[in-house]
Image: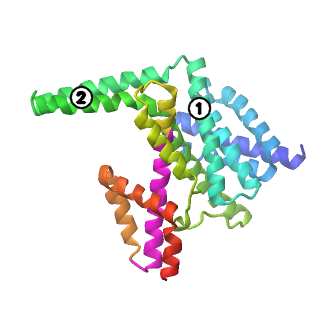
Amino acid sequence: MGSKQITDGALMTGVYLIMLLINVFVPFVGILVFFALPVPFIIYSYRHGFKPGVFMVLTAIILSLLVATIYSLPITLMAGVGGLFTGIALNKKRSAYETLAVGTVGFLLGLVSVFLVTQMLFGVNWVDEINTMLDESFAMTEGMMDSIIGENEATEEQMQVLQEQVQQFPDIIPSLFAIMALGLAFISQLLSYKILNRMEQKKLKFAKFRDFKLPTSILWYYFFGMIFTWINIDTESMVYLAAINIFIVTGLLIALQGFAFIFYYTHVKKLSKAIPVVIIILTILLPTVLLYLVRILGIIDLGFSLRNRLKEDK
């Protein structure tokens, strides 16, 4: 390892430790700093490659245990592994969305590591904790509904449906991990682009969201997930759990494809840029109806190449 690698590694590790201390000990500001924690790992891995990047992650883990507390270990694992994967993808000159995919895998592995470490070292059973929290929330909601509306047959039916949905929540933890990993990967990659562009006069950026396009194969995963959730009666089986999580994650990605097509359509037709923004806001407010329609639009765009047809019409 050269002197530049050692100097750069010491600097980036020091920056990470300062940010970690702010995250652990400074309220409110620490929450904002949390999203920037992977950035030192990304920058170092981008500059020096895989082996030095792994060495920095291991060094940061040891020093974080000494400087902060043992509770900082899960944070460092997540930031380090996720940052390493993203940095390596940048080092290999992957495209922005390829880097995002690799980074998402890294953060997903980091979150799974956090899950396992907290369970082994701290005795935290996340499934039991989540079930307890959901049961308490459900009991509170039921009490509020009874006091406001009063006990009646319609209320009991609504609460029964709600309880069934709540009981399914632990089953979709892998999907929630995947969504969280995607969000963390995107934010940390965006921050790294900003810093590298300023420090090294790079021109790293995400392609326009309207050009976002998934591989067509994602449709097969989506439909297989949907079919297996329908035909599996045993909701406790591993096949069902895998299918429901694949269905949720691929459904979210296809919805993103649908939103991207809306941006693309408004661009090609020279419509107001406010239209897709308004549609996104309405979808957030009315997800049960509009998200379903946006997902259908994404499926049509992927399956029937709507963008190519728009180009031909143009």
Residue 223, placed above or below residue 149:
below
Out of 231 and 226, give the one closest to the viewer: 231
Q: Amino acid at mark 1?
A: Val
Which residue matches tag 2? Answer: 160
Amino acid type of the residue tagged 2 in the rendering? Gln
**Residue located 17% across and 28% down the image:** 156
Closer to the chain start, of discs 1 and 2, is 1
Q: Mark 1 to mark 2: distance in Å?
A: 32 Å
Circle on res. 112: 1
Q: Tell me if residue 100 can be seen.
A: yes
Residue at position x 57%, y 39% in the image = 22
If the image is split into quadrants, where does the N terminus sit? top right
The magenta-colored residue range is 246-271
- Give the side of residue 284 with respect to residue 210, left or right: left
Q: Magenta stretch: residue 225 in it?
A: no
Residue 44 vertical placement versus 279 (above, below): above
Please identify the residue farthest to the bottom as the structure is shown.
314
Q: Position of residue 194 (x, y in %)?
A: 62, 60
